Image (cartoon, rainbow, N blue to C red):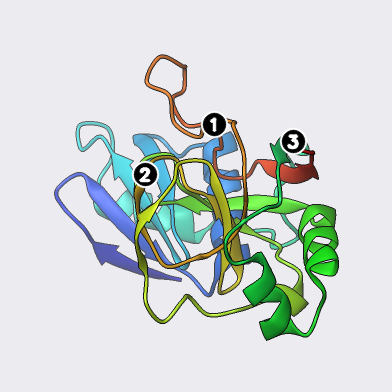
Amino acid sequence: MRFLTAGTRTLLVEVGGLEEVGGLHESLRDSPPPGAVEFVPAARTLLVTFDPAVTTRESLSAAIAARRVSTTGPSDQRLVEIPVVYDGADLAEVARATGLSSREVVQRHSAGRYTVAFGGFVPGFAYLSGLDPLLLLPRRPVPRTRVAPGSVAIADQFTSVYPRESPGGWHLLGRTETAMWDLHRDPPAFLAPGRHVRFVEVQP
């Protein structure tokens, strides 16, 4: 565990990988140290915002370092189901690249139980870990200039849903009408770190 300065009110905690980030995030979220205000997980780091009127960077670092972090996965077992029409532009290409049929790609993707590891890229974009090893593919060599909102996609070790129209280099498997980001909703993000997710195949 390494502690890095990231501003006057923030501390960046670097650990070994996704599982450690998830365990540390859960521990701090469920029982925050005095003065800790907000926790933002990423692939190998956790950004901690704190109130300097309550704690110091040194005290907060010591409190975090003393935590016993579980890497067995988050205890939040609530499952969110996202309906998906699997008619993505890259479905056949993913099948060829993985040596599977398009039907097998859909079955393996929809059979997965995913965990929201962290958010990024644009508001509402959640990186979901737990992708079937046979579906692991690098990003497309040439990103698209436009990806439609609701596109369900895979890249590297993650799957996700594009919350709005944007450029993107992930492989498109399908689409959903579930809104990932809505400013009229509290909270606006549909998926929060630690939440479990299942994609459910539906017909168009």
Q: Which residue is mark 2?
A: 165
Q: Nearer the viewer, mark 1 or mark 2?
A: 2
Amino acid tagged 2: Glu
Answer left or right for 157 relative to 54: right
Which residue is tagged 3? 81
Q: Alpha carbon of mark 3 to alpha carbon of mark 2: how far?
A: 22 Å
Nearest the eye: 78 or 163 = 163
User: Above or below — where is 17 with respect to 50?
Assistant: below
Residue occupying the point 44% across, 46% down: 148
Q: Identify residue for label 1.
A: 190
| Quarter of the rendering occupied by the C terminus | top right
Q: Amino acid at mark 3?
A: Glu
x 52%, y 58%: residue = 66
Q: Is residue 38 above or below residue 61?
A: above
Q: Gap between marks 1 and 2, in whole Å?
A: 17 Å
Q: Which mark is residue 74?
A: none
Q: Position of residue 50 (x, y in %)?
A: 29, 39
Secondary structure state at the residue bearing disc 2: loop
Secondary structure at badge 3 equals strand
Q: Characterize the local packing of mark 1: few (<14), some (14-19) or many (20 or more) Cα atoms within 10 angstroms.
A: some
